[in-house]
Image: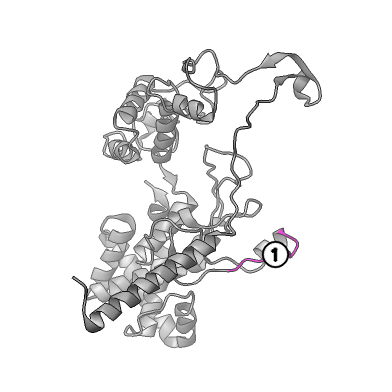
Amino acid sequence: EMPSGGKYADVAAEIAALESEKQQRRSSFDNIQVMVMDTIAKRRSTRVLKTGLYNEPIGEPVEAGVPAVLPPLPVDAPKNRLTLARWLMSPEHPLTARVTVNRYWQTFFGAGLVTTPEDFGTQGKPPTHPELLDWLAVEFIESGWDVKHLHRLIVTSAAYRQSSAVDKQVLEKDPANKWLARQNRFRLPSWMLRDQALSVGGLASLTQGGPPVKPYQPEGVWAEATFGKIRYQQDQGEALYRRSLYVFWRRIVGPTMFFDVANRQTCSVDAVQTNTPLHALTTLNDVTYIEAARGLATRVMTEQPDDAARLRAVYLRLIARQPDERELSIVSHRLANLKAQFEENPDDANKLLAIGEAPRDSSLAVNELAAYTALCNALMNLDEALNRP
């Protein structure tokens, strides 16, 4: 049945608009060029090179293959990349699942069961718990390579849920925590700290997929690294608050808010962990963290009735526990001082609240919101907020 009257015209207009949008999207892809790897019809002859010199091939021609210590490629399959991919992901392959679960274990414990995640060969370290590594690998395969299942399995385990507190006797017997008698304490990676800040501040965009984004970054960083040829164009709106996964990287100069990360010029699977006061220049002063502190302050001020309840809410959101009486006394005293400071210097309060592009809640008193913002910024830099205890 055809729609009648004005309804037909509305539907026709909607269809026309969608067709126009479809055509625009298609035309936007016409000029996009993507490099792909293909297979030539006739393979070139490949021979062993003398000491690796490209112009000195020696010996008989060689063919594609896999190390003899590993399962062989299927006899009836062509020796191409698809066969190699299927071989790597075969349940019978002894390394793929073990290497993968070891890297996830490293993510949650700070060190893998094999402490050389980039090397499972003769030059690498043997696993501290070989049967556990085997069991996790089999579980991972039998779950259908389900990463979420593996993560849930690890984080709900008794081993993961241990405290990192350690007494002198245990520390002397196992200083490196090789036998997992306690949890390892380490700082969260910088990309995770940014995501955490966006989340507690109520700013995080959880949109999935799409092109990379360019959040806040000091001026001139790209220009200096490229002799002025390339300049950073910051995004606006939601793009500023997307998860760190989507932040754009230049290989020669990474995002300035990320410290202790690989430079992307070489493959790196072992996270670097350093400790320097310079990192606090980011977590205390970067625009994203100031905005997140203001967002957290706004949330607790609008949701809670008084200072004590607000401060408890900040602790719960940041470190998932209530403050004890001593902590509550200290932060309450600090909050009172901040309120007094901003009351005497309203211009400072306005400057603080003007940082970043996220709009502030104009219904909240400027001086009080500034005081809570400064306090939340400090509490976001507590060891318990920056570190996985």
Kind of residue at disc 1: Ala
Tell me what residue is drawn at x 44 percent, y 44 percent. Answer: 186
Instruction: Judge left or right: residue 177 versus residue 46.
Output: left
Tell me what residue is drawn at x 65 percent, y 25 percent. Answer: 43
Query: Measured from the top left, where is residue 353 in percent x and y?
Result: 44, 79
Query: SS for tag 1?
Result: helix
Is the residue 257 above or below the residue 351 in the image? Answer: above
Counting the numbered discs, the total is 1
Is the residue 116 above or below the residue 328 in the image? Answer: above
Instruction: Judge left or right: residue 76 versus residue 44.
Output: left
Q: Residue furthest left?
A: 1
Tell me what residue is drawn at x 65 percent, y 26 percent. Answer: 42
Instruction: Identify the magenta region.
Output: 226-233
- Is 229 one of the magenta-colored residues? yes
- Is 83 one of the magenta-colored residues? no
Q: Quadrant of residue 129?
A: top left
Residue 375 in view in this figure = no
Query: Measured from the top left, where is residue 80 in percent x and y?
Result: 54, 26
Is the residue 23 above or below the residue 344 in the image? Answer: above
